[in-house]
Amino acid sequence: MITRQQAIEMFESDDLVGIGLEADAVRKKLHPEGIVSYIIDRNINYTNFCTEYCSFCAFYRPMGHAEGYILPKQTILDKIQETIDLGGTGILMQGGLHPDLKIEWYEDLLRTIKSRSNIWCHCFSAPELVNIAEVSGLSLRDTIARLRDAGLDSIPGGGAEILDNEVRHRISRLKCTTQEWIDVHRTAHSLGMRTTATMMFGTGETIEQRMNHLDIVRNIQEDTGGFTAFIPWFFQREYTSLGRFVKQEATAVEYLKMLALSRVYLDNILNIQASWVTPGLKVCQLGLRFGGNDVGSIMIEENVVSAAGTHHCATEEQLRRLIRDAGFIPKQRDTLYRTYFLN
Ligand code: SF4
């Protein structure tokens, strides 16, 4: 395990190959069999109405906006059936923070989904859960427990951005605080649920602030062991108001360094995801030698980063080839990163 200071020195070093080798050694120790996994699932964004106005977000529409929507239940069920027909094993369902949707709406949706199929429901990031609790007048614990009982299987790490209040105040003033994000994940873990942790960097934050984020994730994992994976990705500026101030997106080199740093520093989290949706397929492939052991999802549908101008896409065969060409064995996984029962 490296110290915070060593991590900062690693990030600031120009020895990109050395950084990659260090991360690859940790990856190899944790995944000696040389498997790189991917999942077939679908993002379903049930509403784009949102009250939070995050400056990095091109997805939301304010209440009453003509382009705002709440997906009808039947549309969500049809999307799930299509996912199953395409060999998908899960859905990642997230939406804006809607002030009128109380817990009963979410319970009814989850129960209906689970009455039709056993698809894995990886849904509702921390800000949504905090919002559901608030509009329903419930504690966070009761909210998560009731949703779990209705069919929620695990919780995505979205809404973390950078877990540092100064950064959050600047880019997502109204959205959940660092402490609330922590509370959601610790509560879910204490209820026996697994979650992922994410980080969106490149919004003008310092390396110290990124390290604050990594320290929070590492400490939670030390206590609970509840994170299945860590997924770093970077801010997409197009069509966002923050994009007027942050003139340049993170470079491929900066992405690879953050990926490697995450792998080395978070050695208590088994899986690190190398993303292709924002950096593109070739950088994702390089990421497999910078600590990544997973390439995420064959995205049947994605609306959030595509709203901010990112339009990379990939088929299952393209991702399998990308993994094979990098010298690894491709394996489909489920939401909990289990590969043993699939191909
Ligand atoms: S990032 Fe989420 S909470 Fe923030 S404005 Fe967009 S949809 Fe709303």
Image (tube, grey):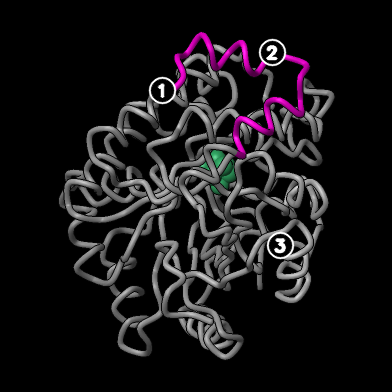
- Residue bounds of the magenta highlight: 1-24
Q: Residue at x 57, y 37 (%)?
A: 25
> In the rendered image of this protein, does residue 116 appear above or below residue 208?
below
The mark lying in front, picked from 2 and 1, is 2
Q: Residue at x 66, y 73 (%)?
A: 300
Q: CA distance from mark 2 to mark 1?
A: 18 Å
Given contact means CB atoms under 8 Å apart, are the residues at marks 1 and 3 in contact? Answer: no
| Label 3 CB-ligand 1 distance < 8 A | no
Q: Which residue has dot 1 on it?
A: 215
**Horizontally, is 112 left or right of 27 in the view?**
left
Q: Is residue 20 magenta?
A: yes
Q: Which residue has dot 2 on it?
A: 12
User: Residue type at mark 3?
Assistant: Ile
Residue 155 screen position, x and y as percent? 37, 54
Q: Is residue 140 magenta?
A: no
Where residue 22 sits, quadrant-wise, is top right
Secondary element at image label 1? helix
User: Residue type at mark 1?
Assistant: Asp
Given contact means CB atoms under 8 Å apart, are the residues at marks 2 and 1 in contact? Answer: no
Secondary element at image label 3? helix
Q: CA distance from mark 3 to mark 2?
A: 28 Å
Residue 49 screen position, x and y as percent? 55, 53
> In the rendered image of this protein, does residue 317 appear above or below residue 188?
below
The mark lying in front, picked from 1 and 3, is 3
**Horizontally, is 282 left or right of 25 in the view?**
right
Residue 51 screen position, x and y as percent? 50, 42
Residue 305 screen position, x and y as percent? 70, 50
Q: Which residue has dot 3 on it?
A: 323
Residue 322 or residue 151, whichever sits in front:
322
Q: Closer to the N terminus: mark 3 or mark 2? A: 2
Judged by its main secondary structure, the magenta piece is helix
User: Residue type at mark 2?
Assistant: Glu
